[in-house]
């Protein structure tokens, strides 16, 4: 089980998928205005991409992740970022290299274990609520918010024969 920074007792009904993204724009000479390539996050995806311009001003590196709750949103978010970076490269005359790698797919939580964990938490006196989580859960089937009560929740999970915190 993944313990996240979401509010304590939040059981993720769905976890976000994650794509790693890297791009490099290179120029023979530093452009007068270094282009900003990053689109704003949309309701269907989020990103934590950063631009890093080298001291000579001839290389711009972009790296970070893109997250979404659905496969379609993950693909659309990646497409929007790639178009934005590609347009900036084309308009500024840069040589462009882009790479992406899907770390994990967005997925729903299995309802049976989710319900069992909710009941166990409630019986132990913890607050319980259900919401999607923007924290990717890779291969772990369940995701639990620990924000504010992480120590107590981890102790509960450790002492329970059914649950293991990560």
Image: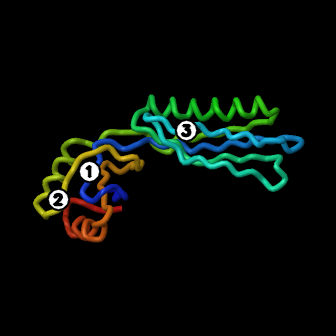
Q: Quadrant of residue 89?
A: top right
Give the image location of residue 26, x and y in percent: 80, 42
Q: Residue furthest left?
A: 123
Neighbourhood count class around disc 3 (C-alpha, 10 Å): few under 14, some 14–19, many 20 upward = few
Q: Earlier in the sequence, mark 3 or mark 1?
A: 1
Q: In which quadrant will I find the N terminus?
A: bottom left
Q: Are marks 2 and 1 in contact (CB under 8 Å)?
A: yes
Q: CA distance from mark 2 to mark 1?
A: 10 Å
Name the residue beneath numbered marker 3: 40
Q: Is residue 124 left or right of residue 23?
A: left
Neighbourhood count class around disc 1 (C-alpha, 10 Å): few under 14, some 14–19, many 20 upward = many
Disc number placed over residue 121 in the picture, else none: 2
Q: Earlier in the sequence, mark 3 or mark 2?
A: 3
Q: Secondary structure at mark 2?
A: helix
Name the residue beneath numbered marker 1: 11
Give the image location of residue 91, x and y in percent: 77, 29
Q: Secondary structure at mark 1?
A: strand
Q: CA distance from mark 3 to mark 1?
A: 28 Å
Circle 3 or circle 1, nearest the eye: 3
Image point (28%, 62%), residue name: 164
Q: Secondary structure at mark 3?
A: loop
- Does residue 79 appear in this view? yes
Q: In the image, is residue 122 above or below residue 110?
A: below
Q: Is residue 131 left or right of residue 17?
A: left
Along the line of sight, the residue nearer the viewer: 28 or 118: 28
Q: CA distance from mark 3 to mark 2?
A: 37 Å
Disc number placed over residue 136 in the picture, else none: none
Q: Earlier in the sequence, mark 2 or mark 1?
A: 1
């Amino acid at each position: 089980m993944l313990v996240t920074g979401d509010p304590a007792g939040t059981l993720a009904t769905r976890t976000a998928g994650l794509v790693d993204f890297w791009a490099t724009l290179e120029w023979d000479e530093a452009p007068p205005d270094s282009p900003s390539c990053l689109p704003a996050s949309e309701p269907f995806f989020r990103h934590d991409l950063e631009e890093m311009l080298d001291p000579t001003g001839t290389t711009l590196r972009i790296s970070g992740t893109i997250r979404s709750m659905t496969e379609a949103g993950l693909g659309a978010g990646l497409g929007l970022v790639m178009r934005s970076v590609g347009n900036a490269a084309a308009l500024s005359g840069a040589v462009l290299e882009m790479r992406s790698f899907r770390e994990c797919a967005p997925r729903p939580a299995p309802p049976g274990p989710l319900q069992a964990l909710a009941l166990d938490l409630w019986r132990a006196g913890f607050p319980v609520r259900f919401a999607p989580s923007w924290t990717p859960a890779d291969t772990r089937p369940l995701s639990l918010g620990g924000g504010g009560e992480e120590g107590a929740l981890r102790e509960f999970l450790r002492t329970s024969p059914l649950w293991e915190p990560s």
